[in-house]
Amino acid sequence: MQIANARNANPDIDIATAENKKMLMGQEVMADITDNHQIHKAIHAKLLESNQSNQELAQRIIAHIRQHEAFEKPAPTTNPLNETTTPGELQLTPPNKEPKPKPNDQFPTNY
């Protein structure tokens, strides 16, 4: 009775379990950006643990888990200098420019 209530409280458990059944039947399943990826990965990992000897199924499960992991990573962004980065690695470097002249070099002193 408690298990049924827990599943009703969190639909991701039911969705991940249904995905496991599809993978067992040889079907490809796709992770969704709205999935609770931690729950899905845990449920898929249990299926993987119990099916290590089935290489085809194991590869299908691993690929699906990687889809969930990809959704967990921050999306790359483009900074003002059009450099693609992920959050946390933004490094502003000025575009290649010639060095600014020194104040004495701006105007010729010998006319």
Image (cartoon, rainbow, N blue to C red):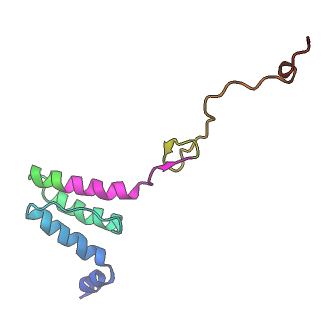
Quadrant of res 93: top right
Left or right position of 7 against 92: left
- On the image, the x and y values in percent for residue 41 come to 29, 62
Considering only vertical position in the picture, is 98 above or below 53? above
Which residues are the magenta region? 61-79
Nearest the eye: 83 or 98: 98
Q: Which quarter of the figure has residue 25?
A: bottom left
- 47 or 103, which is in the foreground? 103
- How far across and how far down the image is residue 103, in percent? 86, 24
Relative height, residue 76 to residue 23 (above, below): above
Count of numbered labels shown in the rendering: 0
For the N terminus, give its image quadrant. Answer: bottom left
* Residue shown at the point (23%, 57%) measured from the top left: 64
Task: Check residue 63 for magenta coloring.
Answer: yes
Task: Check if residue 72 falls in the magenta segment.
Answer: yes
Q: Is residue 17 positioned above or below 106 on the image?
A: below
Q: Compare residues 44 and 79 and report the one nearer the observer.
A: 79
Position of the C terminus by quadrant: top right
Residue at 27% from the left image edge and 74% from the top image edge: 13
Dominant secondary structure of the residues highlighted in magenta in the image: helix
Residue 65 position in % (x across, y down): 26, 57
**Residue 58 placement, left or right of 103:** left
Q: Residue 5: percent from the left, percent from the top?
A: 28, 86
